[in-house]
Image (spheres, grey):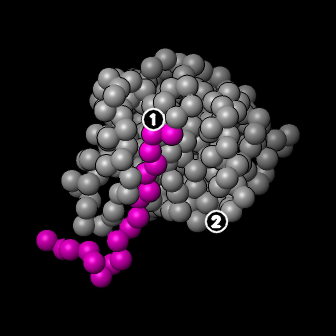
Amino acid sequence: MTSERKIKIAESFSNKYVETELDIDLSQKEFELLGRGFFAGSMDEKWNIFIHKDSLFFARSWTDNCIYKADLEIRRSGIKLNNLKITKNTDEYKGTDLKSDTDLFKKLLQMYLDREDLYIDYRVKLPLIKLTIEKYSKENELRKSIGSQSVELNLQIYNSLIESSSDYITINGLEELTYNTKKYDSKYELLSLHISNKENPSDSTTFFFNQEGTELLGQIIINKKPASNNVHK
């Protein structure tokens, strides 16, 4: 990501926001990782994360909408993340409540920094989800995140990707997921487990479960098409 694009995203952070205190300590290594930034390597990754002017920004990778801004406090005694701001621009982000939005920030930060202490999500302990994580952990070191959103929104996201990017990507598993979720209301929230290879983040899979985490309803893998197959219109 270019410096110009980072500045544009950072400066676009809405003047409508809510804020809360974080008090998260960072090691020098973690600070350096954030300084280099984390940028989406596949269509299935949703965030670009970077530092600009002593603040940490989380922006949606598909739209560049800036959702989170956290102040960095850099002292000789250590480095802290304080004063998290969350956009309330509903055109860019339809957050539910301050606690849920803060928890999401912590979950994302924990995943990218490979920590275990920022947020503990009980859902990763559900038997079928735990089994899925263990199965793939045997093959590769993983990054993992778990979340929930409606059947309607999940299908809308993937169908929109097909419409806009079918020349460049293939989405495997959507037909099965669509069929298996027909029994639910469109507003029913699915649990989603996203896992990716730490060494190769584009090697990723998103698994979808019912709310209780007792039934696997489908899995989505997004692959880039070889450059020679891309159609330029």
Disc 1: which residue: 67
Q: Position of residue 50 (x, y in %)?
A: 55, 50
Please identify the quarter of the rendering in which residue 168 is found: bottom left
Q: Would you name the residue on which mark 2 appears?
A: 199
Q: Is residue 73 left or right of residue 170?
A: right
Q: Left or right: where does residue 102 sit relative to residue 232?
A: right
Q: Is residue 150 left or right of residue 132?
A: left
| Neighbour tally class for label 2: few under 14, some 14-19, many 20 plus, Cα within 10 Å | few
| Location of residue 231 in the rendering, given as x and y in whole percent from the top left corner | 20, 74
**What residue range appears in magenta?**
216-233
First in residue order: circle 2 vs circle 1: 1
Label 1 near label 2: C-beta < 8 Å?
no
Q: Residue at x 51, y 62 (%)?
A: 202
The disc labelled 1 sits on which kind of residue?
Answer: Ile
Between 22 and 205, the one nearer to me in the picture:
205
Point out the residue furthest to the right here: 77
Along the line of sight, the residue nearer the viewer: 96 or 87: 96
Is label 2 in a helix, a strand or a loop? loop
Q: Which of the labelled discs sits on residue 42, or is there none? A: none
Check the picture and name the quadrant holding the C terminus. Answer: bottom left
Q: Residue at x 64, y 51 (%)?
A: 143
